[in-house]
Amino acid sequence: MTTANLVATVDLDAIAHNVGVLRARSGAGVIAVVKADGYGHGALPVARAALGAGAEAVGTASIREARELRAAGLDAHLMAWLHRPDADFAGAVADDIDIAVSSPRQLDAVLAAARTVGKRATVTVKVDTGLARSGVAREEWDETARTVAEAVAEGAIDLHGVMCHLAFGDVPDNPANDQQAERLDDAVADLTRLGAAPRVVHMANSPAALTRPDLARDLVRPGIALYGYSPIPSMGDFGLIPAMTLESQVVLIKKAAAGQGVSYNHTWTAGEDTVLGVIPAGYADGVPRQLSGRMQVHIGERLFPSVGRICMDQLVIDLGPDGGGVAEGDRAVLFGPASAARGDRVPTATDWADMLGTIDYEIVARIGSRPERRYVGGADGNERRVGEEADEVG
Ligand SMILES: *Cc1c(COP(=O)(O)O)cnc(C)c1O
């Protein structure tokens, strides 16, 4: 029995498989990026599955995200890299979170927090090698390197890593990647000369991890590929398996006479007598309203089109004059792999992104908190594999 109208089923075996693909292709260790609640998949179960498959560490954007994982019992190496000036650095030090700093001011704040807590801080230096987003600016590099070296000499910090983030990771042969790598290596050389050599160096996101093993250094930091989406769709799927299936049921079936307008403002009108199905999924769940009349829902072996406006909680599909053989309670897949599905191809999050002119990252990260997350596979033996009992969602 499920109480949520919409269920995001996450296959933890797919996550584990994808970690294996990333390790093999990059030849490096993996920092599993689980920011934004694991790109909508659930940060804690994804982190556990990734670590179980050999990932070496877990990365989040905020300290809050990292501390939530620590509080839930994750004892792996945890790193967070995006902080407000008044971030909870003391909490991060107390919880052994590796704090990636982007300025001398952040480093000073971490040092102050370490003194307050009475504990050595674990620090990674995030260098802006060309993305021009977060990371230590070039004009602040010398001061940052000096302060890091002093703090290391005093025993105030443990310099764990040096990292940067690529601007053109998804364009593997863009020369900017090589320039960023050179600048990162220079930064590591500077710190080493000052007596503060880091333990690990990393820069590669998903696309670079899969296509540029020469950039991997010690570790890679994949996000989207962990969840099974190709970071460079034009280069194929790299053998990755999407982990999420977004599914529900047909909750109501009704007849509509020719001329009947459907949903708000009747933006679609039945051209002939037909049968409508109601799916309890809407934009508050992360189903973009702009997909109104454009997306399709997979039921049984067939696709049925959305008609009229997608609402906050529900959308309507046209089952056709004969009702398509669909019954109330039938499983309805919005996107997936839904591996056991037959017949028409099941839509993917990438299909949705393509229709909207965005990337699948945005589709999965916006699956809200209302849909239930259900986990299958994984070392803990969660339920069964996706799709083995295709009709059982309710
Ligand atoms: C989000 C993020 C990643 C992961 O990027 P993907 O493109 O999803 O692989 C890696 N590193 C940093 C700093 C990030 O912000």
Image: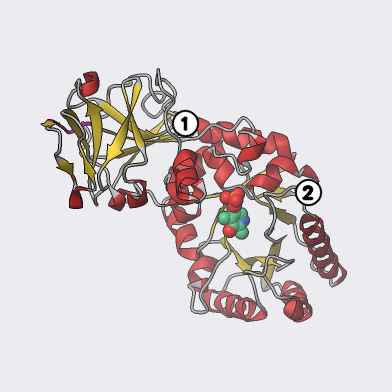
Magenta span includes 253? yes
Quarter of the image for residue 16 reads top right
Residue 20 pos. (x, y %): 63, 33
Q: Main secondary structure of the magenta part?
A: strand
Q: Nearer the viewer, residue 136 or 343?
A: 343
Mark 2, residues whose alpha carbon is within 10 Å: few (<14), some, or many (≥20)? Answer: few
Q: Quadrant of the C terminus?
A: top left
Residue 14 pos. (x, y %): 51, 31
Numbered label attached to residue 365: none
Question: As displayed, is residue 34 above or below residue 350?
Answer: below
Magenta segment:
250-254
Q: Is mark 1 within 8 Å of ligand 1?
A: no
> Could you tell me which secondary element the residue under label 1 belongs to?
loop
According to the picture, the residue beneath numbered tag 2 turns out to be: 173
Q: Residue at image x 64%, y 76%?
A: 107
> Could you tell me which secondary element the residue under label 2 belongs to?
loop
Question: As displayed, is residue 85 above or below residue 387?
Answer: below
Question: As displayed, is residue 8 above or below residue 40?
Answer: above
Q: What whole-number distance in Å separates the C-alpha atoms at marks 2 and 1?
A: 36 Å
Residue 236 pos. (x, y %): 63, 34
Q: Nearer the viewer, mark 2 or mark 1?
A: 2
Q: Nearer the viewer, residue 249 or 142?
A: 249
Q: Nearer the viewer, residue 180 or 272?
A: 272
Q: Are marks 2 and 1 in contact (CB under 8 Å)?
A: no
Query: In the figure, is residue 86 to the left or right of 307?
Result: right
* Location of ligand 1 given as a quarter of the image: bottom right
Residue type highlighted by circle 2: Asp
Magenta span includes 59? no
Residue type highlighted by circle 1: Gly
Q: Residue at image x 54%, y 31%?
A: 241
According to the picture, the residue beneath numbered tag 1 turns out to be: 378
Q: Nearer the viewer, residue 352 or 11?
A: 352
